[in-house]
Amino acid sequence: METFIQSIPHNWYLILSTLLFCIGVMGVLFRRNAIIMLMCIELMLNAVNLLLVSFSTYSGNNDGQVFVFFIMVVAAAEVAVGLALLISIYRNVASTDINVLNKLKG
Amino acid sequence: MTEPFLSDVNLVVPGMLIPLLPLAGFLITGLLGKFLPKSVNGWIATLSILASFICSVLVFQRLDPEHSVNIDLFTWFNLSNLHISFGLLIDPLTVVMLLVVTGVGFLIHLYSLGYMHHDEGFTRFFAYLNLFIFFMLMLVMGSNYLVMFIGWEGVGLCSYLLIGFWFKNDAFNDAAKKAFIMNRIGDLGFLLGMFLMLFHFGSLDFDTVATQAAGLGSNQTLVIAITLLLFIGATGKSAQLPLYTWLPDAMAGPTPVSALIHAATMVTAGIYMIVRSNVLFALAPATLTVILIVGVATSVFAAVIGLMQNDIKKVLAYSTVSQLGLMFAALGLGAFSSGMFHVVTHAFFKALLFLGAGSVIHALSGEQDIRKMGGLRKLIPITYWTFLLASLAISGVPFLSGFFSKDEILAHAFEHSKLVWVILSASSLLTAFYMFRLVYLTFFNNFRGSEETKKHIHESPWTMTFPLIILCILSIVGGYLGLPEVLSHTHLFGNYLSSVTEGSKAYLAETGPVSHSTEITLMVFAGLAAIAAIWYARKNYLVQHQLPEADVQLTGYRKWIYNKFFVDEFYEKFIVKPVQLLSDLFLVVIDKLVVDLIVSAAAWFIGLSGRTLRLLQTGNTGFYLFAMVFGMILLFVIQLFI
């Protein structure tokens, strides 16, 4: 089974993971909608997951896959909290645009 | 010779109580004074000194003059090459000073009960007096130079507190500061002397230093340097040229303060210190010569100024400076026990003179100018008679105490150098003259003050007259402690102190014993000279009713003498002003331009950073996220290079 997966060069997984991560970062930086930002953060986390799993497969060490479980748990918890905060903010300013929240301007 | 601690319990217990009782008196009156009634505070303070005096008498009775007792209380400094212990030394010299300090101190406390009765700072006064006595006792009982120095500094401090006692008056505060600062200049010399001793001898104990110095031999530069520095300390404390100007100004303090500090005790600390170090000084003939010159010069200089002073206390102040000069001259001649003898007799009659002056001032409701006095002889008789006897004593009229002590010093002077004898005799003549000028102007002829003052003239209460009478008796009989050879085979005082002074006898120049006929001639001459001076004063001030002129009319040499030879003005112009200019220079240049600049530059920089960093707070969440990402990339890059 491992040989099958290893027919795809490892580099491709690394490049894919990096691309996904960069897209996620750019999404977080350039998008204004808070929900989209949260989704991009998820994208970043999943890119890292992919990376860890690929390394785990290609080196035969299962630690990477175990760590992915941890990341998934953390991501889930974080999304729950993030969405709760988002709802609370929406109730106050009736918008999901992050540029509306500039009261800390010094 | 030192003895083990516990073998002299009889001596050690009273010995340790002597300084502790005044300290306790100070703590009680100082800390608890405002909760206790005024008179209780006064009596606590006075009785603590009385108890100290009784302990001193016990110590005197129980001490064997040949065996001094060293009470080592605890080790103070215990560093690798520095071992100094805090200890008390009880030997004949200490006992003499203890008796004088506690005895005269007690009488002055008693006097103050009456004199300061109406003062609102009554309790504070007694607290300070007790503190002063404590420090003075530490000074005389110390077993090494450092403990002595504690007392030395402490009495300087108390002198400042007591001179500036009526602190609401700026002039008095200035006088207090002047006294303290001049003392401190002298103390610098004392400290440097101690540093040299410590560096070269490794110890500050009196015995150790003396033995090691003796081991070096006579006329060594080191010993001369140490003794000169110690003498500078003595000059400051005992008001010799050039550091004497604080003493007349110190008359700003209450009269009991002048009596105690500036007549009987603190100013004699310098002489005590030199007698204590007699071996060191005997090994340095050059220093002894310097001491002699300074002492003689001071004696004459101050006596001349005293001739024209019009404030009763200032006359006595200059008289004190002059008598101290005489004592230093005695030390300079190597006559250490004669110097101490004069310290003791001087304490009696000078304290009496000051207390008597205080009594006069009290009777006249605060008047101190003798031009406004007169005719008080019948109005305040006890004060008059005691003051008269004290004046006779200080003038060296035969058979009173001053005669014997002065005569001893003059005899030593005659053996040593006729010139010194002539100058000191002249000084004694002037002393007799200005003292009796004071007596005649104050007590004789008619009262020259206002009618208002005259109505209130009254003799002082018993707490003030009793000390006067006791001191008067002591001034009369005190001389019999030291009768010269012609009259008695034993010189009680000199013999008592012999164990202390014998160390130096080996190194002093040999002078043959004075023949009896010379001694008698000198005594007769001194006695007659004193009487002649008194007669001359009588002629001027009693018979011819001469009065001191008003301030503005003086010319020529009289102007110089009246203005105290302009010494204060000289110091003001050539020492004080340059230092103040330097201080102003430092203020303008270094303080304002340099230090302030550095501090404001630092503040400006912080402000700049703040203003700049504030721009990062845009409130824009997107920007914050960008900053986070940027920061992380930066960290990744940096960690590649580290």
Image (cartoon, coloured by chain):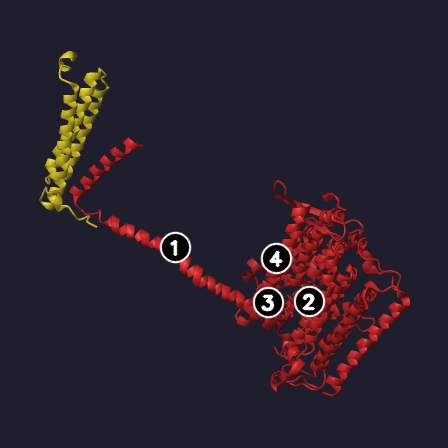
Chain colours: A yellow, B red
Q: Tell me the element at label 1.
A: helix
Mark 3 — residue? B163
Q: Residue at x 44, y 59 (%)?
A: B590
Q: Which three-letter amino acid code belongs to the residue tagged 2?
A: Ala
Classify mark 2: helix, strand or loop. Answer: helix
Amino acid type shown at disc 3: Ile
* Earlier residue among tags 1 and 3: 3
Tag in front: 3 or 4: 4
For residue B591, what is the image quadrant?
bottom left
Q: Earlier in the sequence, mark 3 or mark 2?
A: 3
Q: Residue at label 1?
A: B598
- Where residue B556 appears, as percent x and y from the top left, is 65, 82
The reply, left or right, for residue A45 in relation to residue B105 is left
Gap in angstroms between the C-alphas marked 4 and 2: 23 Å
For label 2, the residue is B263
Percent position (x, y) of residue A4? Answer: 13, 12
Residue B106: where, in percent of width, then height?
Answer: 69, 63
Chain letter of disc 1 in the image: B
Q: Kindly state the secondary structure of the residue where label 4 is placed.
A: helix
What's the residue at 87%, 71% (across, down)?
A: B521
Distance in Å between CA atoms under marks 1 and 3? 42 Å
Q: Earlier in the sequence, mark 1 or mark 4?
A: 4
Residue at (74% x, 85% y) in the render? B540
Query: If you read the primary sequence from the N terminus, does the residue marked by circle 4 or circle 2 appear first?
Result: 4
